[in-house]
Image (cartoon, rainbow, N blue to C red):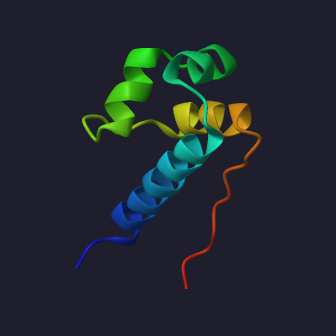
Amino acid sequence: MPSSTSTAKTDLSAALKQAIENSGYSNYALSQLSGVSQGVLSRFASGQRDITLDTAGKIAAALGAELRVKKPR
């Protein structure tokens, strides 16, 4: 059974990838808006790399989204 931490990380990654896809931004445009390198964005999108919470926050802010921490049930 996965831990609540790994489940939260998976949920965050999936939600962020969906938000990136829905934004219509190219990696270049999102990189310029967020300050996150195109390489990091590309490796994250392809599943080759996890991202830090700091990086996730930069991407979310560039997309006009927010990160929320929910208390586990």
Which residue appears farthest toward the right when viewing the image? 64
Horizontal side of residue 61 vs 43, given as left or right:
right
Horizontal side of residue 14 vs 55, given as left or right:
left
Q: Is residue 57 above or below residue 12?
A: above
Where is residue 43? Give x, y as percent. Answer: 32, 29
Residue at horizontal 30%, vertical 35%? 49
Residue at horizontal 60%, vertical 24%? 30
| Quadrant of residue 73 within the rendered picture | bottom right
Which residue appears farthest toward the bottom when viewing the image? 73
Q: How many labels were placed on the picture? A: 0
Where is residue 29? Give x, y as percent. Answer: 61, 18
The N terminus: image quadrant: bottom left
Residue at horizontal 57%, vertical 33%? 54
Instruction: Tell which of 2 and 18 is nearer to you.
Output: 18
Which residue appears farthest toward the front when viewing the image? 24
Horizontal side of residue 10 vs 49, given as left or right:
right
Where is residue 53? Give x, y as percent. Answer: 53, 40
| Quadrant of residue 2 within the rendered picture | bottom left
Instruction: Tell which of 45 and 71 is nearer to you.
Output: 45
Residue at horizontal 44%, vertical 56%? 14
Q: Is residue 18 above or below residue 24?
A: below
Where is residue 47? Give x, y as percent. Answer: 28, 41
